[in-house]
Amino acid sequence: MDFGPFLLLALMEGMVMAAVLALTAVGLSLVFGVMRVVNVAHGEFFMLGAVIAWFVTHFMPGPPAVAFAAALVICPLLVGGIAALSDTLILKRLNYDPEATIVATIGLSYIFQQTALTFYGPDARPVLAPFDLRIQLPWFGYSGYKIAVVFAALAILLAVWLLMTRTRAGLIMRATQLDRNTARAFGINVDRVYAAVFALGAGLAAVAAVLIVPIQQAHYLMGHDPLLLSFIVVIIGGLGSLRGTLVAALVIGLSDGVISVFFSPTLAKILATLLVAMVLVFRPQGLFGTKP
Amino acid sequence: MLELSNINAGYGNVQVLRGLSLTAGPGQVTCVMGRNGAGKTTMLRAIMGQISTTAGSITLSGTPLQTLPAHEVPRAGIGYVPQGRRLFGELTVAQNIEIGLMTRGKGRATRDYVLSLFPRLRERLSQRSSTLSGGEQQMLAIARALCLEPSVLLLDEPTEGLQPSMITLIRDTLLTLKSTGVAIVLVEQRVDAVLAMADHIAFVTAGSVAETVPNTGLSTDSAQFKTYVGV
Ligand SMILES: Nc1ncnc2c1ncn2[C@@H]1O[C@H](COP(=O)(O)OP(=O)(O)OP(=O)(O)O)[C@@H](O)[C@H]1O
Ligand SMILES: [Mg+2]
């Protein structure tokens, strides 16, 4: 293949990566922004989304498209429910203390992993894509499903953005983020907002996982990479900045795609980690964050 | 009628309020004075349920407030203008007002009334509240609290750092509210402002009300002001 088409292929792979990464990282960023909780279990919410998607599509009768659509609805709801429960049972009791919640979410991540290992097993299992369409470009054929993933992710991100900026629920979340005591003085039930935000963040990771699982397979240890990359994205974009998170996801996703195709995935991760180190040294508030 | 009776409260192991009692009646302005650190802000935060009391009772028209979660206290009809304003700085003027209205499900009529009290805010609805001038921020803090149509209004040093004309505006607004039957608790350090507005003055020292006097026959050089405020 010539360089041009090869680059195009790499960019398309990068776009898929960026789209799924953006969804996952926005979830992490939202939770940190509103609750000031560094959620180390975020990658396991992603993994749970993928594993539950396997169960749903495996046991659901009917055509793969219907089973997949069901997974797309059931997984984020179920994972969101698990997250809301974790918030109420654990994080709330720790008073959202920043250090204690880090330790607690590390603990949660082991619980989720071991639960998945027990009930799902150690194997990686595929989930059928909802449709099988190859789009033939002049130079190579490309999976129509991957293109659909990019558009689905964009649609969900747009919905999140509208939720945060155009709705009453978004206003309540932002007020809570800015000053939780004053929010309480204006009737905002901060406990309920926190549970909802934690559920929303986990649900976004889960939906990202459902989208990616026909490409990647479900495995009980698959949460590591999304967690690491989400942290990289959130740090580069600026903690709590939605816009920064999106831009950083695009940069990391695209460069990961390109570098993985031309060189190796390991080099891509090395460079991303190096970029984080540079950002932490020269611009600790992130590229789009405001100085604390 | 808001009644605090013998309340104790503090932060962690540090007790700040010691047997504090205070009554604020409808259509009355109850001013609270005391030195820095006397516990005035702590008292208001205890009323709002932001810190819990360890003894005593707080009631609103006979209903106990201490058992309510903090977010239910404003819904019972208590508007709060915190010290330092505490606006939602990244949100616009309109959004701050919207949050005030949501507290008790008030609508357009309330919004129009509140904005008619502060026409300057109406001109700046889409401005980020952190970019307002100090006086405008204070107007917004008061407007946001009035969006609850509160029966009790708590204000913590609303005139801090404001020029005389702005203080006059705030005074006139509070006197208008008073005439509609709102119970006003005003924490205030300026003696002239207190003399112009108060029905009663409660002097706080070391976490309790040492003396409550009606605002009759007082002047800027009355003994109480020297004793409790040091002016
Ligand atoms: N969050 C807190 N944690 C610990 N101690 C606090 C806290 N907030 C206030 N205090 C202490 O409680 C005491 C009373 O403070 P408070 O803010 O109620 O005083 P105040 O009368 O409002 O003073 P000022 O006139 O300066 O506003 C002070 O000694 C203060 O240091
Ligand atoms: Mg104070």
Image: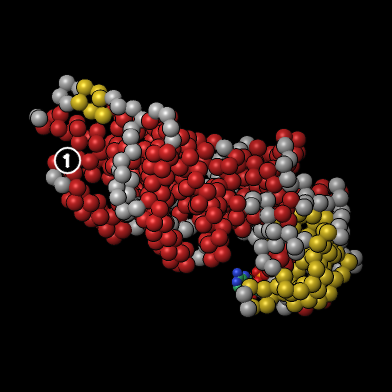
Question: Could you say which is closer to the camera, residue B204 or residue A219?
Answer: A219
Displayed quadrant of residue B84:
bottom right
Is any atom of residue A213 visible in this view?
Answer: yes
Measured along the vertical axis of the image, is residue B162 above or below residue A5?
below
Question: Could you say which is closer to the camera, residue A82 or residue A275?
Answer: A82
Q: Position of residue B219 (x, y in %)?
A: 84, 68
Question: Which quarter of the rendered picture does the N terminus of chain A lie within?
Answer: top left
Is any atom of residue A208 visible in this view?
Answer: no
Look at 40% across and 34% down and name the residue there.
Answer: A68
Look at 62% across and 50% down and name the residue there.
Answer: B137
Q: Position of residue A155 (x, y in %)?
A: 42, 32
Element at badge 1?
A: helix
Name the residue tied to disc 1: A261
Q: Quadrant of ligand 1?
A: bottom right
Displayed quadrant of residue B46:
bottom right
Label 1 crowding class (10 Å Cα cut-off): few <14, some 14-19, many 20+? some
Total labels drawn: 1
Q: Position of residue B12 (x, y in %)?
A: 62, 75
Q: Find out if the beta carbon at label 1 lies less than 8 Å from the nearest ligand 1 atom.
A: no
Question: Which quarter of the rendered picture does the C terminus of chain A lie within?
Answer: bottom left
Question: Could you say which is closer to the camera, residue B199 or residue A15?
Answer: A15
Q: Chain of mark 1?
A: A
Look at 50% across and 52% down and name the residue there.
Answer: A83
Q: Residue furthest left?
A: A2
Look at 20% across and 36% down and name the residue there.
Answer: A10
For residue A77, side relative to residue A191 (left or right): left
Measured along the vertical axis of the image, is residue B73 above or below residue A68?
below
Question: Could you say which is closer to the camera, residue B175 or residue B50?
Answer: B50
Colour mapping: secondary structure
Q: Position of residue A107 (x, y in %)?
A: 42, 64
Amino acid type for the residue under numbered disc 1: Val
